[in-house]
């Protein structure tokens, strides 16, 4: 997945299909399920002290937020191929970096939107400080980014290859 500055998100067909299936579930069967939970909790009586009712309403709010996020993401999505293996860091690539001063201290991560996050590799957003610092750099180049404490950190780009899923 690649995000560009004009709010277009580039997705592989697989990622698009996965997010579309999640949206279909959340806006269909999941809505029916949460409505049933709320109705059942409402029948229990006093809503001011009804923990089940409040939990179900909170779950409904989170679910509706996710529906809105997915709807916006998919409305602005462009389905395409993974970035080319040019040696230039771009969203949709697995990037390996070495932290300044310690070539043994390395990190490999996927530069992509959180929507594309996977449990098998750490994911950094292109809008994150590290993502912004490395985006557009070539293998062998140094990149600098700002840490949360305001200090600057340097890394060297060791590798950048398209994510294969």
Image (tube, rainbow, N blue to C red):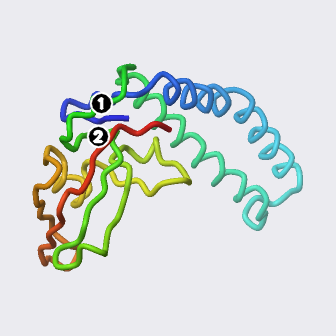
Residue 164, image x and y in percent?
A: 46, 36
Quarter of the figure with residue 156: bottom left
State the SS at label 1: loop
Number of callouts: 2
Image quadrant occupied by the N terminus: top left
Residue name at image x 28 percent, y 27 percent: 8
Residue 134, image x and y in percent?
A: 18, 53
Q: Residue 13's mark?
A: none
State the SS at label 2: loop
Q: Is residue 146 above or below residue 30?
A: below
Residue name at image x 14 percent, y 44 percent: 136
Along the line of sight, the residue nearer the viewer: 33 or 96 = 96
Along the line of sight, the residue nearer the viewer: 32 or 150 = 150
Q: Is residue 45 above or below residue 22?
A: below
Q: Is residue 38 left or right of residue 106?
A: right
Residue 149, image x and y in percent?
A: 20, 79
Q: Is residue 132 left or right of residue 35?
A: left
Q: Are marks 2 and 1 in contact (CB under 8 Å)?
A: yes
Residue position for label 1: 83
> What is the CA distance from the residue labelled 2 to the residue labelled 1?
8 Å
Along the line of sight, the residue nearer the viewer: 101 or 55 = 101
Residue name at image x 67 percent, y 51 percent: 57
Quarter of the figure with residue 147: bottom left
Q: Is residue 127 above or below residue 150?
A: above
Neighbours of disc 2 within 10 Å: few (<14), some (14-19), many (20+): many
Residue name at image x 54 percent, y 35 percent: 67
Residue position for label 2: 91
Q: Is residue 49 above or below residue 71?
A: below
């Amino acid at each position: 997945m690649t995000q560009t500055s004009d709010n277009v998100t580039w997705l592989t067909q697989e990622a698009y299909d996965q997010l579309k299936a999640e949206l279909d579930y959340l806006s269909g069967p999941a809505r029916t399920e949460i409505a049933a939970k709320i109705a059942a909790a409402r029948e229990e009586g006093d809503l001011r002290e009804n923990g089940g009712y409040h939990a179900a309403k909170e779950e409904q709010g989170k679910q509706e937020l996710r529906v809105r996020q997915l709807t916006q993401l998919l409305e602005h999505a462009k389905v395409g191929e993974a970035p080319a293996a040019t040696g230039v860091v771009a969203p949709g690539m697995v990037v390996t970096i070495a932290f300044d001063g310690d070539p043994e201290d390395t990190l490999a991560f996927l530069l992509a939107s959180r929507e594309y996050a996977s449990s098998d590799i750490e994911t950094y957003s292109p809008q994150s400080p590290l993502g912004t610092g490395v985006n557009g750099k070539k293998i062998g180049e140094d990149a600098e980014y700002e840490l949360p404490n305001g200090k600057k950190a340097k890394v060297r780009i060791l590798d950048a290859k398209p994510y294969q899923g």
